[in-house]
Amino acid sequence: MEINRRKFLILTTSIAAMTSSGEPSATSSPGAYDVHAHWWGMTIDIDKCIGCGNCVRACAVENSVPEGFYRTWIERYEVPPGEDATPVVASPDGGIHGFPPMQGADAKRFFVPKLCNQCAMSPCVQVCPVGATFVSPDGVVLVDEKYCLGCRYCVQACPYGCRYIHPVKKTVDKCTLCYHRITQGLTTACCEACPTGARQLADLKNPSDPVHEFLRNNKIQVLKPQMATRSKTFYRALDGAVR
Amino acid sequence: MSSRLKDAAHLIPLVLVVLAGVAVFLLFRQVLVPKTFGQYGHYRAAALDDIRVRPVSFAGQATCAMCHDEVATTRSKGKHRGVSCEACHGPLAKHADDPAAMKPKKLAGTGLCQGCHKADKAKPAYFPQVVPAEHSGGAECLSCHQPHSPQMQ
C-alpha cells in the first residue's frame, strides 16, 4: 500500500511538472499534497543524541551533499567546570564518521545536532535580492536553483551557518527538510536514520502530531532566540553553552 | 482653448514615447517573469514542484515492514524497536522499488554495533555502552546478541 502510494505520488507530481511547466498550477493536482495544510519543523532531544553520525551520513546520501559540505552536522560540546570556562566545540568532518570516544568525568559533554532551523522570519529570505530563497506556504525554507545567482548574501545572513555554495552548481544549497520526502508522507532522511529518535519531524499544523505533547511537556529552547528568527527547530535539554 | 492645445503639442511625442516605454516594459515583464512567480509570495511557486520530484534514497520503515514483517515483529519486541531498518542497513529505496534490482549488503556486525554502543563520556549516561575489550574480550557482538532483538535471553 505504502509503496504504491509513494510511487503514485512521485508519478503524479512528475507528470504534473512535465505537462504544466509554465502554467500557474504548482501543487494543485487533485488529491495531492496541500501546501497550506502543514507547517513543518523539527524537534531535537539533546539527551538522546549519541553522536553516531547516522543523520549526517543519511543526509549526504539522500540529498547528494558534496563532500566537505553539510546540510546537517553534529557538534560535540565539552564544558569544563567553572563559570568562566570556555566550551570546547568539535565537529570533525561534521561528525559524519562519528566521534572518537572521550574518557573522564571532569567536564560536561554532550552532542548537538544542527541543521537549518526553518525560521518563520528568516534573515536569509529577507536578504535575497531575486526571490530565489523563500519560506514555502508549509514553512520550509527552500532555494530555487533556477533563480539563485550565487551572490552569497543569504550565506552571510544565516545566523546558524546552515548555507553553503554548491561547488558544482555554484548556487546556494541547504537543508530542504527533505521536502521531496515529507510531501509524500515520509519522514526526513536524518530522522529515518536516527537510531535513538533524538530527531523528530514535526507538523505543527497537525493537531495529532506528537510535537504538541513534546513542546508542552518539556523545557524547550531554540538556537539564538535573541535573533528573533522564529526558529522551528526546537531543542530539548539545550545547554546555555550552545551557540 | 485651441491655443492652449497648440502650446502643449510638443508634449505629445514625449507622452507617446513614455507610453511606448511602458508597453515594452509590460511586454518584457510578461515574457520574462515566470507564470507562477508571486502565486504564494515573492518567488517562483513552481520551484516547490522542482524540489518535490527529487529522488528518494531511504524507503522508510513502513515500506520495509510491508515485506519483512517477520523481522519487523522481532524488532518491535526488542530493545531496538525504535531503530529503523535503514538506520543500520542503509538507504534501500531501490531495493524497495524492485527487490531483485538491488540486494542489501550483509552487515559487518561488531564495527557497526560499536558505532552506537562504544563507551563515550559524551554520550548520555543512560544509553547502553560498553568498552568492547572489557565487555566481551574482543569477541564478535553477534556471537552472543541478535541484532534485531539484542537483549540476551
Image: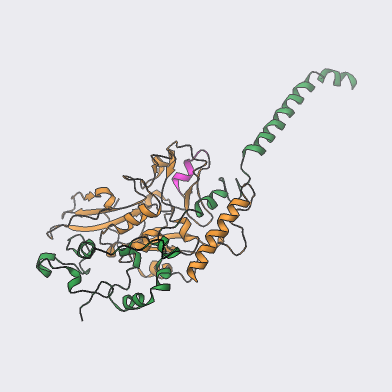
Q: Is residue A40 left or right of residue A82?
A: right
Q: Is residue A48 left or right of residue A173?
A: left
Rendered residue at 53%/42% (across/down): A131
Q: Can you give x and y, in whole percent of width and height, for residue A95 in the image?
A: 27, 52
Q: Which chain is green?
A: B
**Residue A198 seen in this snapshot:** no
Q: Position of residue B144 (x, y in %)?
A: 18, 74
Does the magenta segment cover residue A213?
Answer: no
Quadrant of the rendered image containing residue A80: bottom left
State whether residue B60 appears in this view: yes
Where does the image place residue B48, in percent across and percent down from the top left? 53, 52
Q: Colour of chain A?
A: orange
Residue A123 part of the magenta-drawn span:
yes
Q: Residue at (25%, 71%) from the top-left corner?
A: B147
- Using the image, determine if residue A43 lies above or below residue A18: below
At x 42%, y 57%, the residue is A232
- The structure residue drawn at horizontal position 27% and vertical position 55%, both measured from the top left corner, is A240
Is B137 or A111 nearer to us in this picture? Answer: B137
Question: As rendered, which of B78 and A220 lies closer to the eye?
Answer: B78
| Span shown in magenta | A122-131
